[in-house]
Image (spheres, rainbow, N blue to C red):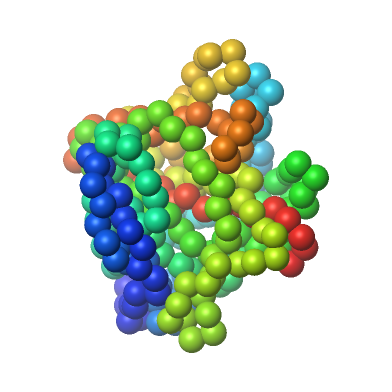
Amino acid sequence: MDWPETRVVARLTGSLPMGGVVPDTPIHAFAHTPAALALDPEPGLNPQRRDIDLGGLLAFAIDPVVTAEEADRIVAASEVFGYRDEAPGIATPPGMRMNKSVHWVADEALLGPVFARIRHLLPPEIDGLPLHGRLSHRLNMYRYDDQDVFNRHIDGDWPGYGLDAERSEMLEWGGGLRSCLSMLLYLNGADDGVVGGQTRLLGRDGRWTDVTPVKGAALFFRHGFSTDSVVHIGARVSGPVPKYLARINVMYGPPG
C-alpha cells in the first residue's frame, strides 16, 4: 500500500512498561486521508450486539464492526508510524502495561463509517449524558508480541480528540464531552495465529469472563474512575504472531 507523508501532531510524556518516562513521545497523523483508510459506509456487514453478564456492570461485544481487509489496513497504517515501548500521555505503574504502543489521530473518513455501523447498538445515554455523534479520532493502538501482557487495570475516561484544519496539530474537543466507554477493536485473532490475548473482565461477583479476540469485532465496557468501571486484563500472548488492537473512546455529552 502507498501511504501519505506522516507527521507528529503532538508530543506528550510517555510512560515505559517497567517504570520511567520518556519526554516528547510523539502522537502521529497522516498529512491527508490515506485511500486505504477511507472506509465504505455500507460494506455489507450486519453487526450484532452480545451483552456480557458482569453482575450489573456494562459490557458488550459487537461483531462484526470492520471487515478483515479493513482490519489489515488499520494494522498496516499503525506499523507505518511504528510501535514504541513508551505510551504518550498514559501513566501506568511498573509491570502493568507490558506491550508496545502507538497513538495516532485519524479522521471521519475512517471513524465516521465505523460509528455509523454501530451507533444503533450503543447505549443512547449514560449517566444522563447523550451519546455524542462522533467517536474520538485518537486511536490508542497496542501490539502484543510474544509474552506481552496488560495486567489488571481500569481505563480512565478521556476527552475527545481530532485534528486541526491543516492536520498539523491534535486538538482536544471541548463542550463538556467525555468518554464513558472503551471500544477495543480487535484487528486480528486466533484465526490469524494469535495464541492467547483474551480480554478478561471482572464482574461484581468476583468472577472473570474471558473474551476471545475475533478479527473485526469490538468489545465495549464502561470506564472511568468509578465503581461502575470494568476491571480487566489483556492476557498474555504467546508465540510469533502478535495481537493488534485499537482502543477507541466512545463519547458522551452535549450533542455535536
Residue that protrudes farthest toward the bottom in the picture: 166
Residue that protrudes farthest toward the right in the picture: 128
| Left-right relation of 41 to 83 | right
User: Picture coordinates of residue 183 (x, y %)?
Assistant: 55, 46
* Residue 49 shows in this picture: yes
All told, the count of numbered labels is 0
Residue at the (57%, 20%) spot, across then down: 203
Quadrant housing residue 127? top right
Q: Nearer the viewer, residue 82 or 96?
A: 96
Residue at the (24%, 42%) spot, across then down: 19
* Residue 212 shows in this picture: no
User: Picture coordinates of residue 75 (x, y %)?
Assistant: 36, 58
Residue at the (33%, 81%) spot, across then down: 5
Above-or-below relation of 99 to 140: above
Query: Where is the C terminus found, in terms of image quarters?
Result: bottom right
User: Picture coordinates of residue 109 (x, y %)?
Assistant: 56, 72
| Left-right relation of 151 to 118 | left
Above-or-below relation of 109 to 62: below
User: Picture coordinates of residue 90 (x, y %)?
Assistant: 39, 50
Query: Where is the N terminus found, in terms of image quarters?
Result: bottom left
Quadrant housing residue 94? top left
Above-or-below relation of 158 to 27: above
Residue at the (38%, 60%) spot, across then down: 103
| Left-right relation of 3 to 208 | left
